[in-house]
Amino acid sequence: MSIFDVFDRISANSAAPKGKIEYVIAGLGNPGLEYDNTRHNAGFNVLDTLAKQCGEDINRLRFKGKTAEVMLGDKRCLLLKPTTYMNNSGESIVQALEFYKIDVKNLIVVCDDISLDAGKLRIRRKGSHGGHNGLRSICELTGSDEFPRIKMGVGKKPNPEYDLAKWVLGKFGKEDSEKMNQSAENACECIKLMVQGKTDEAMNKYNS
């Protein structure tokens, strides 16, 4: 057997994703080390967790974001972390959807939610942006709010007068960090169910 035969056999047995991209899974956040582990980056953290489970790193620069291709069951999916900053998340997502000719209903967005306690999840099939600037950007640029999303509870502001930007760009304490780590694992399980058409099961099992 020649060395070329060996390479061909390795290539044929490769676990690399094959086939058409069927889903775009976008986690929202802000790029840069200063934003790591902040409340606003809950979506980024979920995608990092999911990529790690799949043995991948989200590091290929495409569509104004960082990407990786993974297989979730029999579905080939694009993991996307927009690097446009939160308020312009839609710019990145629209590019990916248009490139792969994917309907917005096959977009799953993961984002933070300050109306939920840290560690809580809320899965929705569709809905308004609810004042979240990342979701607002996606709704405006896709022209639709009919995409499923997983909202990651990051905790409410300490009081109504507390500055919102300061809160969402703040980091978690130790107790909440542990809750968010488990929440990220749960969100990954939700995503795996959702791409298999089992959104109801994900909602019944994980909605808070």
Image: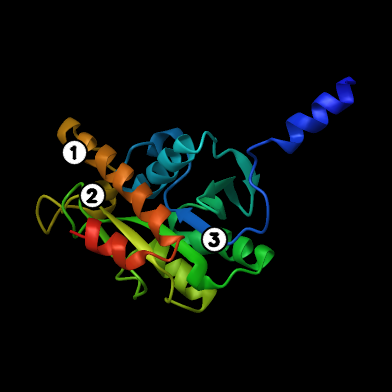
Mark 1 — residue?
A: 176
- Whether 189 is drawn above or below 195: the answer is above
At 20% across and 40% down in the image, what residue appears? 179
Does residue 82 appear anywhere in the picture? Answer: no
Crowd rating for badge 1 (residues with CA inside 10 Å; few <14, some 14–19, many 20+): some
Which quarter shows the C terminus?
A: bottom left
* Mark 3 vs mark 2, CA separation in Å: 26 Å
Q: Label 2's element?
A: loop
| Mark closer to the observer (3, 1) | 3
Relative to 47, does residue 150 appear above or below in the rendering? Answer: below
Instruction: Classify residue 190 by image quadrant.
Output: bottom left
Give the image location of residue 157, x and y in percent.
15, 52
Give me the disc on residue 23.
Answer: 3
Quick one: 117 or 205, which is closer to the camera? 205
Q: Earlier in the sequence, mark 3 or mark 2?
A: 3
Instruction: Decide: is 102 above or below 207.
Output: below
| Residue 59 coordinates in the image, percent (x, y) | 59, 38
Instruction: For marks 1 and 2, give the CA distance.
Output: 8 Å
What residue is rendered at 55% in x and 40% in y?
Answer: 58
Residue 154 is labelled as 2
Q: Could you tell whether 67 is left or right of 127 in the image?
A: right
Q: Amino acid at mark 1?
A: Asp
Looking at numbered disc 3 in the image, what kind of residue is underneath it?
Tyr
**Circle 3/circle 1 CB separation < 8 Å:** no
**Contact (Cβ within 8 Å) of mark 1 with mark 2:** yes
Residue 11 in percent (x, y) is at 75, 34
Specify the quadrant that holds the N terminus. top right
